[in-house]
Amino acid sequence: MPSRPLHPALAGVSLTAGPALTPIAFVKAIVQAYADQHKDPAKALALAHIAPADLADPASRISAAQMERISGAAMQELDDEALGWFSRRLPWGSYGMLARASISAPSLGLALQRWCRHHGLIADDITLQLTVAGDTATLCITEHRSLGDLREFCLVSVLRNIHGLACWLIDSRIPLQGAQFPFAAPQHQDVYGVLFSGPSVFNTAPAAIRFDARYLPLPLRRDEAALQQMLQRALPLTVLQYRRDRLLVQRVRQALLTQPDQSHNADDLAALLKLSPRTLHRQLKDEGASLQALKDEVRQSRALALLLRTSRPIKQVAQGAGFQNEKSFIRAFRGWTGMSPAAFRRSGPPART
């Protein structure tokens, strides 16, 4: 059985014929690809239950399932998984080939670097690049020729595709810190909040997405068998909803350490991490952790540091560690270490002022 092309279903969060969120502009881009090859899109439109009259209404939207159907039909009929974006076609199976070249990588970072490099071998109209600055990883697109009327569809699709692949490779949600695009905000800019988590900005070059660089060293959790199965229906790849975020424990710990004023309780912390409190607790449980345990861990670490490295009074140490009062701090500290904070300080190295 031939593999399905690895390509995004540019739509919302459901693969059923549910919310119609995908802008008709993306369908018109596919129709343009047919016109460029002097072919008739009528069969693909009918398969996706898209009426020709819908194309004339800029406000019209279709569902994820409809986008999957018309994209898959067009890729086969045009034998071009890029749907006319580039100066040469990407024959059926091209993106599956790129996935196979990446899946043997030992880490997500190396897999993405391979994808970027190999993509340039099959389509030199654009260059994909992965860079890291501090704690932020950026995947950007450099354009080497005009992409014309298909520019938005191309750039959005390529970024959605590589983000979806990255999530699939490590079986994890990868929240985006933001996305940027070198064109003006389109009429349907509201859909970008669905397509890309985090804020999207326009009139900013180059096209790019940003995410936490700590995902890059994570090992891949997929093998060739999983790839074969995924390629049978790869189009919905970028609308899969991953319950697990394999970095959530680290993200929670970092927030508690660096932003204690904004992470006093679950509601505040969840808002900071752009999650619901229920999702926060559920995902931590999936990772074998709990918010209370992480809070205790961070509090204990901060308390130990203050006791050993400063000569602050116990009351100030309690406040610095995030406790409401000295009594509750002493009780918690005895539970951690079996001794009082004062006894622990006396047993350690001399404190600095």
Image (tube, rainbow, N blue to C red):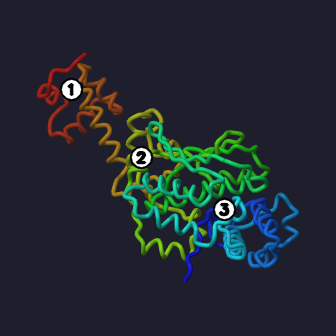
| Residue occupying the point 15% across, 30% down | 344
- Numbered disc 3: secondary structure: loop
Crowdedness of circle 2 by 10 Å Cα count: few (<14), some, many (20+)? some
**Quadrant placement of the N terminus:** bottom right
Question: Mark 3 or mark 2, which has the lower sequence index?
Answer: 3
Question: Mark 1 or mark 3, which has the lower sequence index?
Answer: 3
The reply, left or right, for residue 23 in relation to residue 109 is right
Residue 173, above or below 14: above
**Real-space Cα separation, disc 3 to disc 2, in angstroms:** 27 Å
From the viewer's perspective, is the residue at label 1 or at label 3 nearer?
A: 3
- Numbered disc 1: secondary structure: helix
Q: In the image, residue 59 lies at what x, y percent?
A: 82, 58
Q: Is residue 57 visible?
A: yes
The residue identified by callout 2 is 214
Nearest the viewer among 18 and 314 is 18
The residue identified by callout 1 is 308
Res. 10 mark: 3
Residue 266, above or below 219: above
Residue 225, above or below 114: below
Crowdedness of circle 1 by 10 Å Cα count: few (<14), some, many (20+)? some
* Amino acid type, residue under disc 2 in the picture: Arg
Nearest the viewer among 42 and 124 is 124
| Residue occupying the point 51% across, 47% down | 130
